[in-house]
């Protein structure tokens, strides 16, 4: 199996053998046990990281292993992500010290348990009143955040529920303006105002 790793716009492909995925079960379980005790993820301490957060932690370890050219650890960390997230095809690793901004990439939508109660994603066919739409648009478009020296924001795809990150922008002002445009587009989609 292959995991594509994207680090600062550079891409790496890690090929993990099915044999390693089978043989490393005990190692992966030990990692889960360690992470279940809680983990410092950037400025936040997460008491009991969920499956995605654990893979974000492991992606950070994968980045460290890549920097150290530690082939064994690269394979094991990539194997953990492939084993724990069926359908994942890649990882966009945050290098700005915010593990929670690391993004999992899926080749095609996969059915996963909902992250929030009821429907986490609002169907584009379902029109909301202005107040509901403003609240939902605020959930579907993140605030501007810094990644290294650039600024970004992310928008939730209404079809798949996946987060799509904007391209890097040099100024916070530009990122804020583009975020507001994305927010307005989502608001229009949710209220049915768009053409």
Image (cartoon, helix red, strand yellow):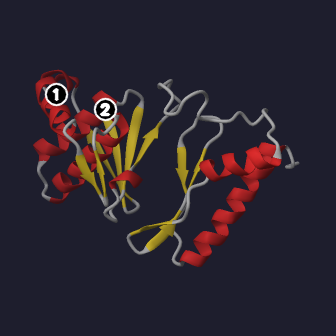
Tag 1 secondary structure: helix
Choose top left, top right, bottom left or bottom right for residue 118. top right
Q: Looking at the image, which residue is at 52% across and 32% down?
A: 108
Q: In the figure, is residue 58 to the left or right of 136?
A: left
Q: Nearer the viewer, mark 2 or mark 1?
A: 1
Residue shown at the point (22%, 35%) measured from the top left: 36
Up-down relation of residue 25 to residue 52 (above or below): above
Residue 159 disc label: none
Q: Position of residue 53 (x, y in %)?
A: 34, 42
Which residue, given by chain and number where applicable, does mark 1 sit on?
A: 29
Q: Is residue 79 above or below residue 7?
A: above
Q: Distance from label 2 to label 1 (Cα)?
A: 14 Å
154 or 122, nearer to the observer: 122
Which residue lies at the image location 71% right of the left edge and 33% below the top edge? 123
Horizontal side of 11 relative to 78 (left or right) equals: right
The residue positioned 31% from the left and 32% from the top of the image is 82
Q: How many marks?
A: 2
> In the rendered image, which quarter contains the N terminus?
top left
Asked which secondary structure carries label 2, the reply is helix
Q: Residue 39 appears at what percent x and percent y?
A: 23, 47
Q: Is residue 40 left or right of residue 139?
A: left
Q: Is residue 9 visible?
A: yes
Picture layout, residue 29 above or below residue 152: above
Estimate the x, y position of residue 78 in percent, counting from the top left. Answer: 25, 39
Q: Quadrant of residue 190?
A: top right
Q: Is residue 92 above or below residue 108?
A: below
Q: Earlier in the sequence, mark 2 or mark 1?
A: 1
Q: Position of residue 62 (x, y in %)?
A: 22, 49
Asked whether residue 1 appears in the rendered view, the answer is no
* Residue 82: assigned label: 2
Q: Is residue 90 left or right of residue 33?
A: right
């Amino acid at each position: 199996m292959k995991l594509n790793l994207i680090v600062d716009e550079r891409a790496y492909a890690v090929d993990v053998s099915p044999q390693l995925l089978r043989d490393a079960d005990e190692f992966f379980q030990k990692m889960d046990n360690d992470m279940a005790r809680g983990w410092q993820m950037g400025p936040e301490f997460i008491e009991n990281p969920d499956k995605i957060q654990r893979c974000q932690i492991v992606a950070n370890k994968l980045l460290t292993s890549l920097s150290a050219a530690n082939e064994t650890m690269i394979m094991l960390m990539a194997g953990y992500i492939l084993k724990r997230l069926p359908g994942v095809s890649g990882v966009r690793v945050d290098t700005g010290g915010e593990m929670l901004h690391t993004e999992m990439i899926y080749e095609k939508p996969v059915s996963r348990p909902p992250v929030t109660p009821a429907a986490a994603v609002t169907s584009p066919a379902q029109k909301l009143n202005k107040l509901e739409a403003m609240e939902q648009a605020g959930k579907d478009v993140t605030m501007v955040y810094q990644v290294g020296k650039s600024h970004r924001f992310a928008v939730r795809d209404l079809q798949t529920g996946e987060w799509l990150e904007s391209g890097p922008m040099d100024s916070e002002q530009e990122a804020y303006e583009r975020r507001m445009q994305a927010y307005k587009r989502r608001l229009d989609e949710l209220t049915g105002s768009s053409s």
